[in-house]
Structure formats: C-alpha cells, structure tokens
Image (spheres, helix red, strand yellow):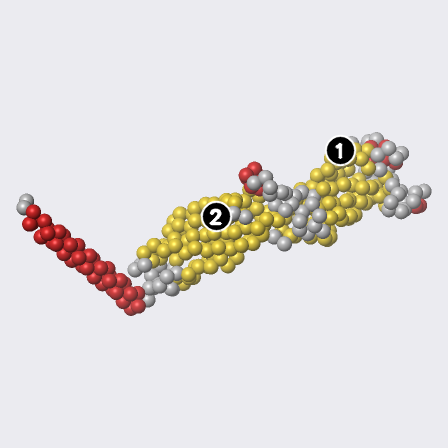
C-alpha cells in the first residue's frame, strides 16, 4: 500500500467510528424515549419497600428466632416476580448471620404484600466467633436486606433496606433455696414454703409470670409444682420469692430428720421459669444441685420466726 493511502484509511476509520457512535447513541436515546412513553402510558413504576417490623416469637438460652417483616408495594398493572432476597445481620461491623431466599414469590398487580423472612440466631455460633460478646449482655444489630425484583421496562431492580435495634444474649438465672419453712407438720403430710433467692445476671429486667419446678432431697423427689407467680427480677440484681410445696415425710426417708436436727441435707431443684423481657417472652431453665438447707421453725414450734434465723 502506498504511503499516500494512509490518511485516507485513517479518515475513513474516524468517520466510521463517528457514524457508528452517533447511530448507537440515537438508538439508545430512542429506546429510552420509548421506555419513558411506555412507562407514562401504561403506568409502570418502581416498587417500594420498607421494614415494618421485627418480631421475636421464640428466644431462650440457645437461640433466638426472628421474623423480619417487609412491606412491598407494586404500583404496576402486572404482577412482578420477587427473584431473590439477600439478608445479613451484623453487630458493630461483625457478621452474625446471612442468607439467601431464592424465588421468593410474585407481587400482585397494583397491590402490597408483607414478606416475612424467618431468621434463627444461634448463640453458640456467636460466642465461638466473637468471644467478646458475653452472656447476659445486650448487643446492637443492623439488618441489611436486598430485594431483587424484575419490573417490565426497568428490568431487574435491587431494593436495599436497613433496620437497627438491639438483641439480648440471655444468661440463665442463678437460684438457691435459702430455707424451708414449715406451715404444717405431720407424719402424713407437710405444707412448707421454699424461700428462693433468684439472681438475674442479665443486663435487662425479667418479669416473672410463672414457674414449674420439682425439688429433690437426698435424691428423693418431694414434689413438683406449676405455679403462677408475679415478680420483677431486676437486672443484675437479686430477688427473693416464696413458693409453696406439699409432701409426705415417708417419701424421702431420713433427709427430713437430718434437717430437723439442724444438720442440713443435700437438695436439687429443676424446672423452668417463664418471663417477659423487653425483647419478648422467654422460657429459661432453673437448676440447682449439691447445696444444703435446713428447717426454719415457726415460733409455736419453739423457734425464732425472724427471717435471718435458720
């Protein structure tokens, strides 16, 4: 090829690029204009979404079950698919749990729907990964949710959502039977009151509703009770409550006589306590083993009825 041909080639390439570029831009503008006209004529629009609530239907010492509620509004005249839901729960920049819900359903035309996302947070997983998170504490959380929808004209759209709040890492109650006070004593049936000491080591109050329990003396069960009882167990504090129990001395042998003689005896107590918290209702286990107690006598039995005297 002769040297004088080069400028002609370069000039043709530039013209071709300008021609192609201009043509593509015109096509894009045309498509955009058509899309806007279709949107305006048919009424297509982008969906909106908002986190309307976070509920805790179940929480205990092992895990917390959350339900994230999201209200999605579809302004379009046709149903649109909700392709994926991505969610992540973190605390202070640390990921606690994440997940993906594929093919999450279809949003009806000109309507709104509440989508519920169930999430389970297992405390052992948190404590294993983040040792600085202690039982009994309250930690901040941030929920991030991405809703991916497919809208005519617009195509796939991601709707990002966030919500912040606090969640507890519950700690079990510490329980002690401080003394047993007999209201009626006989060889056939005894009616007694257990003076309980409950220590709440959580950073939040617990509203006691009821408790069920069984008590053993020297490995012999002396009775079980399901009792409705109201009390406020203050955070990081100690609360004393009295609970009744009825039993027969012959059911547990020499343990009672050791208590009468002031020797004390081993006991254990197991059960559950149902409480209200700022985060929802909880059912917490109560256990105590290997301690000792002795009888508190009434004045008519020859004892001092002062609560400090056992």
Contact check, label 1 and label 2, Cβ < 8 Å? no
Horizontal side of 171 relative to 83 (left or right) equals right
Towards the viewer: 61 or 297: 61
Residue annotated with mark 1: 290
Towards the viewer: 15 or 252: 15
- SS under mark 2: strand
The C terminus: image quadrant = top right
The N terminus: image quadrant = top left
Horizontal side of 100 relative to 20 (left or right) equals right
Residue reaching furthest to the bottom: 41
| Neighbour tally class for label 1: few under 14, some 14-19, many 20 plus, Cα within 10 Å | few
- SS under mark 1: strand
Q: Is residue 45 above or below residue 98?
A: below
Total numbered circles: 2
Towards the viewer: 216 or 109: 109
Q: Give the residue displayed 79% in from the left and 33% down from the top.
A: 266
Q: Give the residue displayed 14% in from the left and 56% down from the top.
A: 15
Is residue 177 visible in the rendered structure shown here?
A: yes
| Neighbour tally class for label 2: few under 14, some 14-19, many 20 plus, Cα within 10 Å | some
Is residue 82 visible in the rendered structure shown here?
A: no
x then y, percent, for residue 55: 55, 53
Q: Give the residue displayed 78% in from the left and 32% down from the top.
A: 218
x then y, percent, for residue 84: 39, 50
x then y, percent, for residue 283: 64, 46
Towards the viewer: 277 or 247: 277
Residue annotated with mark 2: 88
Tell me the distance, in whole angstroms, between the alpha carbons under discs 1 and 2.
44 Å
Quarter holding residue 25: bottom left
Horizontal side of 236 relative to 33 (left or right) equals right
Q: Is residue 90 above or below residue 188?
A: below
């Amino acid at each position: 090829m002769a040297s004088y041909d080069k400028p002609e080639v370069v000039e043709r390439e530039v013209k071709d690029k300008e021609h192609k570029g201009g043509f593509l831009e015109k096509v894009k503008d045309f498509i955009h204009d058509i899309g806007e006209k279709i949107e305006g004529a048919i009424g297509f629009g982008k969906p909106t979404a908002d986190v309307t609530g976070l509920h805790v239907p179940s929480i205990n010492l092992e895990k917390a079950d959350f339900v994230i509620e999201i209200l999605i509004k579809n302004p379009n005249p046709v149903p649109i698919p909700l392709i994926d839901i991505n969610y992540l729960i973190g605390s202070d920049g640390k990921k606690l749990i994440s997940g993906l819900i594929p093919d999450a359903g279809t949003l009806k035309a000109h309507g709104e729907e509440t989508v519920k996302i169930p999430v389970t947070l297992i405390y052992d997983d948190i404590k294993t990964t983040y040792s600085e998170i202690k039982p009994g504490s309250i930690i901040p959380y941030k929920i991030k949710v991405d809703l991916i929808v497919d809208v005519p004209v617009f195509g796939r759209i991601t709707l990002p959502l966030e919500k912040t709040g606090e969640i507890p890492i519950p700690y079990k109650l510490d329980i002690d039977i401080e003394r047993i006070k007999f209201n009626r004593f006989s060889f056939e049936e005894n009616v007694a009151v257990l003076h309980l000491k409950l220590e709440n080591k959580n950073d939040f109050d617990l509203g006691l509703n009821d408790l069920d329990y069984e008590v053993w003396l020297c490995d012999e069960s002396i009775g079980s009770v399901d009792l409705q009882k109201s009390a406020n167990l203050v955070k990081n504090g100690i609360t004393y409550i009295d609970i009744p129990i009825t039993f027969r001395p012959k059911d547990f042998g020499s343990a009672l006589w050791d208590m009468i003689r002031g020797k004390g005896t081993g006991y254990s107590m197991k059960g559950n306590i149902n409480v209200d918290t700022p985060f929802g209702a909880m059912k917490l286990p109560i256990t105590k083993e290997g301690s000792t107690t002795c009888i508190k006598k009434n004045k008519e039995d020859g004892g001092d009825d002062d609560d400090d005297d056992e």
